[in-house]
Amino acid sequence: MTILDTAERHRNIDSPNPLDWISPAPAAEEAVGAPAKVRAKPILIQPGLVLAYIILAVALLWAVAPGLFTSYDPVQGLPGQQLKAPSALHFLGTDALGRDLYTRLVYGALHSLSGAVAAVAIGLLVGTALGVIAGSVGGWIDEVIMRLVDVLLSIPVLLLSLSIIILLGFGTVNAAIAVGFTSIASFARLVRSEVVSVRRSEYVEAAFGSGGTFFKVLWRHVLPNSLTSVIAFTALQVGSAILQLSTLGFLGYGAPPPTPEWGLLIAEGRNYIATAWWLTAAPGVVVVLVVLAVNRVSQAIGRAQQ
Amino acid sequence: MARYIFSRVGQALLVLWAAFTISFVLLQAMPGDAVLIKFQNPEYGLNAVQIAEIRAAYDADGSVVLQYVHTIGNFLTGDFGYSLQAGVAVSAQLAANLPSTIRLAGLAFAAAALLAVIIAVLSNLPGLGRLRSFIQSLPSLFVSIPTFWLGIMLIQIFSFRLRLVPVINPGEWEGLILPVLTIALPVSAPMAQILLRNIDEVLTRPFVSVARAKGASHTFVLWRHVAKNALLPVLTVAGVLFGELLAGAVITETVFGLNGIGSLAEQAVNFQDVAVLQAIVVISAAAFVTINLAVDLLYPVLDPRLKAKLGGVA
Amino acid sequence: MTVSLGGRLEGSVLPSPVLDISGLRISYLDQNGPRTAVHGIDFSVFPGEVVALVGESGSGKSSTAQAIIGLLPENGRLESGNIRLNRLEIAGWSQKRLDGIRGSVISLVPQDPGNSLNPVRTIGKQVAEILVIHGKASGAAADARAIELLERVGLNQPALRAKQYPHELSGGMKQRVLIAIAIALKPSLIIADEPTSALDVTVQKHILDLIDELRREFGTAVLLVTHDLGVAADRADRLIVLKQGRIQEQGPTTNILTNPQSAYTHRLLADAPSLNVRQRRVAAVAKAEHGKAGDDIIVVEGLVQDFGRGGKDKGLRALDNVSFRVRRGTTHALVGESGSGKTTTIRSVAAFQKPTAGKVIVDGLDLSAPPRETLRLLRKKIQLVYQNPFGSLDPRQTIAGIVEEPLLNFEPIARAKRAEIVASTIEKVGLPLDVLQRRPHALSGGQRQRVAIARALVLNPQILILDEAVSALDVTVQAQILSLLDTLQRDLGLTYLFVSHDLAVVRQISDTVSVLNGGKIVESGVVEDVFEHPQSAYTRELIDAIPGKKHPLHASRSTLTNSGNI
């Protein structure tokens, strides 16, 4: 039993299904894994948390006030400036229509980040609600919700989002809904396992023992204590949503051209890969940096909660 | 034990049935079906009667319930309907495309597993210093790279710049090198992360101290005591890894212009070819459920504690 | 029981020590930088001798043991000092070099048998492994020797055990396996780090007897690390008393027990229940009897509790026909080992679960079929204090919030009035008012338990259920909490239902007792009667197993219960 006992907080060891023993999200386990040891160095190579925060701050500023970072127009190309290599004038060169790539990246932040946030919000709200209901009410409601979650988890994430796209059609909002829908199941599962473990704790029993009603105890103890680990998981999901949205954008299911969405930029740049490789490389690097930064912050939140 | 197997198989079938239903609801029961979208196009010059006939041929008429029953019956007999876009049986398309995707995904899985183990072993070698934290940081880098971009960059670097791997008319296996790598890197990341975390966690358990107190060396303890305890839980995410593999295949086949289930799915979305996408969704769900079932049935064989638990129940 | 130290000293030549420690300093690196845990200690262990390192949590006893065998946690560091093993200086040795002597010259019996065996390897392989590592045997020969060793440590069916996995063995059996590993190569020193603190008292006795017997047979010296003075007093030739990384006192066991030199040792001895068996409190009910008391506030009759999924599954019968009565204003103890059903019993009394059959009547309220309102009424009468104050206090609430919470569940009380009640309750349990704004993690274990008691008291209940409420605490803190409970009982006329595995504590503080075994009450009655003239064999075994009998102390020492207020 040892392996199970140490990690009981996160694994439903009563279940005969070994899958239930392990929480589905790396962040969740990170958040409550073995006690922090000196050996556990930051997983990032060097940059550390500060760099991650700086990257996120810049990305957010790009989204909020793109005008501060560039004076070019993201959509209107400059005549005679097509496919210029990076220079002092055009920091990251220009694309086939003479648009400044750096400017398009700056303006693209709004599309990519807001899409990711909207997607995660859907997963967070619906998933958390389902998880809280399943975990706190229990009984057959719990059974039904969790079987539904199992079913959603059985369909690979990308196929599930493609199914929703085929249903709703292409576009930024639909892509965000599709991505958000795919994260409902993992949110629900995490939240339920947290709620169940908090419900088993002695302070919850003590709260009932001092006359607390179901809703009072739920509000005072179960929710605050079970939702903390959701924060780190939410951050992690933002990173994954950015990736998924850029994938959908790349496949052409997201924002239509000439929207400067990051995934779409990579797709557009790809046609000129042999001559203007930076058109593909630069947006990819931006995506990688932002996702790394988000994941790093998520990890830090998880650690802090221990 | 028999009861355990029976209940696991039952649950698996239930999940599969529900997955089919969800995909049916999402894809077929909604208004504005694909047949209408395609054939209402004035280019075809069809009148309402002709459209109705076509709808009947595609089994798109009748009540939703009837369609549902019909479709489920067809799926059970291996009839997945007809592709609107290609006009051939979906089952034929699947048969033509499955082998290449299975080969791609299989190789990628092997490569990913190898990579994950290499990362885990390397980061537990003594005396690595800074290199060790670099190796440990690789998985989080790998999960942060968009797969499609990785594929493009690999082509750019290895084919165009270094000219190591041809992209135009490559040999059968040569052409798989970059796609396999493209899928393997992101799939290796969660495996490596779980392995690293488990190894760290197992190393803190009292039985490791006891083994050290017997005089066992660090390396001996890692292989004899830690390895199995750390590897077992990786099995439990096999299903999730399968999903990642499949997603990787969709993207990689698109990027590299390979034939397979992935590119089939991508085209299905482009042309709103619902029957094809539903078949792929249901088949993937079936594969996922089968993998998890296999893990569930295998786990008690590998983990003595679970065997006892089940033995007690049965 | 042992070769006496005195005998050895009379010999003309003093043998060289197996272990000689001098100036040992250990520090740990945590978020706040390095923190010294052991401040330069010196001691020796001679061949064939049992030396006990005794101390409360944070005394550095386990760190010392880990440092000797070279297995400090990763953030621990041996700062300075000498560790001489058979005159060989091993303090600076690399792990690789230490591997050669670990297991063969020095071995370990760990604290927690439940987690100390690899769950996915067979018992036999794990025993044989030590022979293989040191090249003493291999293959079938090692397996055969492993079975011999298992037999030697008293496991029945050793050949079968060798093929089993750890989860198929009980805690005591696992500890025997670990002892078999420790003695396999006849080392000159065994470090036994709290070898029995995770085990039931009867199992503890058998395990300690086994270590004693083997050590005599092989002439091995034992360094016994323990928090339990009773165990140390019974088993050790010499005691080393540690407090916060410094040695307070060391010397022959009898000397220290009869004539402690340091104030700390004095206090430790006075507070250890197992060493003060003759000390008895004056019954709390004596006062109450003059008043209205005398009635039974808790009546449990024929209580049966089954667990299981119902239906075809044959559930587990956790309680079988349990009956007892508790008089108002007295302390009734439920004692038993793990799995005896004592926790199940109190959960039924506190109405956290419905009895399968039988009656529970608390202050006239029948809990067999309680309507919701009865249940809420009951909550005001009966409160529970848990074993582990880490788990029973919500880490996110302030102390004020925790203590106030029960008040919010009943008739509304004005905010100012609530604050007043909370403050007076906090004072009642002997805490300063400045804890109110802190959170549980900022408090010590004893303070947390006081908070838990305050929360239980804030509704003015008549009954407190104390579920192993002092078991997780250090002995000096335990004594303070017990004394607090005694005062509260006398001041407030409380009735206690006291659940414990520790018979010495039970004997000290309760009026009546029920002994539970396997879900049944095997004996019940007034504490003196049960302890002096136990009727059932099981009770006798339990009482025999209480450590600390070898050196009974006289009740002349300052008593812990302030019984002077009659």
Image (spheres, rainbow, N blue to C red):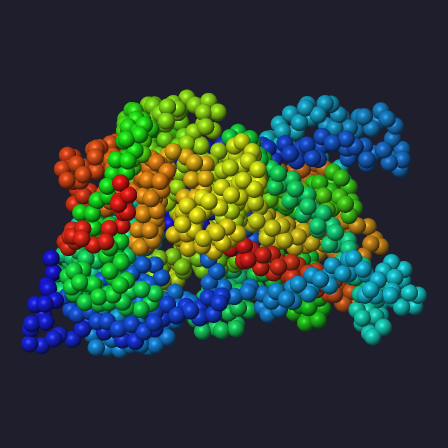
Q: Position of residue B256 (x, y in %)?
A: 69, 57
Count of residue discs: 0
* Residue at left offset 18%, top offset 43%: C543
Q: Position of residue C126 (x, y in %)?
A: 28, 56
* Residue at left offset 15%, top offset 69%: C47
Q: Position of residue B128 (x, y in %)?
A: 48, 73
Q: Is residue A87 above or below residue B168?
A: below
- Towards the viewer: C512 or C60: C512
Q: Position of residue A85 (x, y in %)?
A: 82, 71
- Towards the viewer: B42 or A31: A31
* Residue at left offset 77%, top offset 28%: B55
Q: Is residue C125 visible?
A: no
- Towards the viewer: C66 or A186: C66
* Residue at left offset 83%, top offset 70%: A90
Q: Is residue A281 visible?
A: yes
Give the left or right position of residue A47, taking residue C69 as reference: right
Displayed quadrant of residue B14: top right
Give the left or right position of residue A25, taking residue C543 as reference: right
Give the left or right position of residue B50, taking residue B177 as reference: right
- Towards the viewer: C393 or C1: C393
